[in-house]
Amino acid sequence: MIRHSVLEKTATAVRARIVFPVAAPPMFDGVVHIEGGRVVQVSPKPPAGVPLTDLGDVALFPGMVNAHTHLDLSDRKKRLGKPGTPMSDWVRMVINERTTPKKKLNAVNSGAMQSIRQGVTTLADIATYDPLELPTINGGPRSLRFHEVIGFSQARAPSAHSGLVKKLKRSKAEGAPKLDGAPMEGVAPHAPYTVSPPLLRNLVNSAAEWDVPVAFHLAESKEELDFLMTGAGGFQEILEERSMWDPWAVPRGSVPLDYLRILTRAPKALVIHGNYLERKELAFLARHRDSMSLVYCPRTHNFFQHDPYPLEIALSLGVRVALGTDSLASNPDLSVLNEMRIAAARHPRVPAEAILEMGTLAAAHAMGLGHLVGALSPGRYADMTAVPIPDGIPDIHTDILTAVLRDATPPCQTWLGGETVDGD
Ligand SMILES: [Zn+2]
């Protein structure tokens, strides 16, 4: 539900004890001037003749950007499996979950509203549902929906590819979803154990042809690396069980770099997880940072008890790293702020500002939306979230950010295009 605190085209301003524009240094007692749903400027002085709301003791951030989730699993009350569950066992549990198309759509709506309540105003969703069936919801996050594609064997690859092309054509015929000309749909080849290299190549070529982004789970588990190397293990067993196994689909001795090379042809590629990417693969991502980004999902990474995440190496090499929550099947909530908090605790040598950027502007750039959202600067949408400042901290801006990241308080107010939204 939208509360019409700010009407379209009217001007307004909000002041906070500290504003983090992200694309510019933090500002104490900063004022965000908004007009027609967009930021006009962030300055110390309120604009003349414009109604001003003083938010008091809060830190004001751009709306958080979630670079990876599966909203169709958002009706879950708890995660699937136990911490440390092997990835292939967990994937089997996800496959065995029974649901209906209607339940999925309800879960997507529920996840969208949960996201808003957590201050997430833009997200990248992997869609196993038909986005055209979704009822319009007012006050939901800006959602880039990636059509998921699965089809491991050579026999299934052509129909998997033509199914995707059909979806893209249909959505174009109905007016492809866009945000100021930027595509809000994409292609999600699932993972190396469900999509073979030839199919991936075809899907990426189609994404390039339609000029839409690609999201691909890669190097998530050691089991996956073993599978690529040997063609054996838990993932092979799942494929066998489902009559999808094809011993010729992946050449023995394959490595994630083979897949990264294919992804370079995508207009934008989100490499999801990358928990076990090697240094040379991270360096490859850094060289392609204009189009390729790495998406780190800190709490999902913890849940599966993976080896330490190579965040410091990735950042030092210049990789664009974004944050994602992944789904409620491996994470307790859809809060990017909580992902930042865990990332800050796990990686104390990474500056708090870098972590904030990963959950805002870097994630927006990863999705091809960095010129529209992810920062509070002139011309971008006035998507914002306010977080209460914990008591008793010194008046130094970096300390406020660190204190917010050490705290557990959720956002208290969120705006989408200058209007407050409450996720109800
Ligand atoms: Zn995922």
Image (spheres, rainbow, N blue to C red):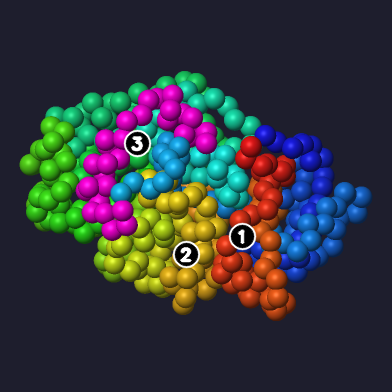
Q: Are marks 3 and 1 in contact (CB under 8 Å)?
A: no
Please state the extent of the stretch shown in magenta in the rendering: 82-110
Residue 76 is left or right of residue 219, and the answer is right
Q: Residue furthest right?
A: 49
Q: In percent of the image, x 25 and y 51: which residue is there?
A: 87
Question: Considering only order in the chain, which callout, 1 or 3, is on the residue closer to the N terminus?
Answer: 3
89 falls in the magenta region: yes
Name the image quarter holding residue 54. Answer: bottom right
The residue at which mark 1 appears reads as 409
Find the distance from the CA under tag 2 to the CA under tag 1. Answer: 13 Å
State the image coordinates of residue 234 (x, y, percent, origin top left): 15, 48
Q: Which mark is residue 342?
A: 2
On whether ligand 1 comes within 8 Å of the CB at mark 2, the answer is: no
**Type of amino acid under label 2:** Ile
Question: Considering only order in the chain, which callout, 1 or 2, is on the residue closer to the N terminus?
Answer: 2
State the image coordinates of residue 360 (x, y, percent, origin top left): 55, 56
The residue at which mark 3 appears reads as 148
State the image coordinates of residue 414 (x, y, percent, origin top left): 67, 48
Q: Identify the image quadrant of the N terminus.
A: top right
Find the distance from the CA under tag 3 to the CA under tag 2. Answer: 28 Å
Q: In percent of the image, x 54 and y 25: which residue is there?
A: 135
Magenta-colored segment: predominant secondary structure: helix
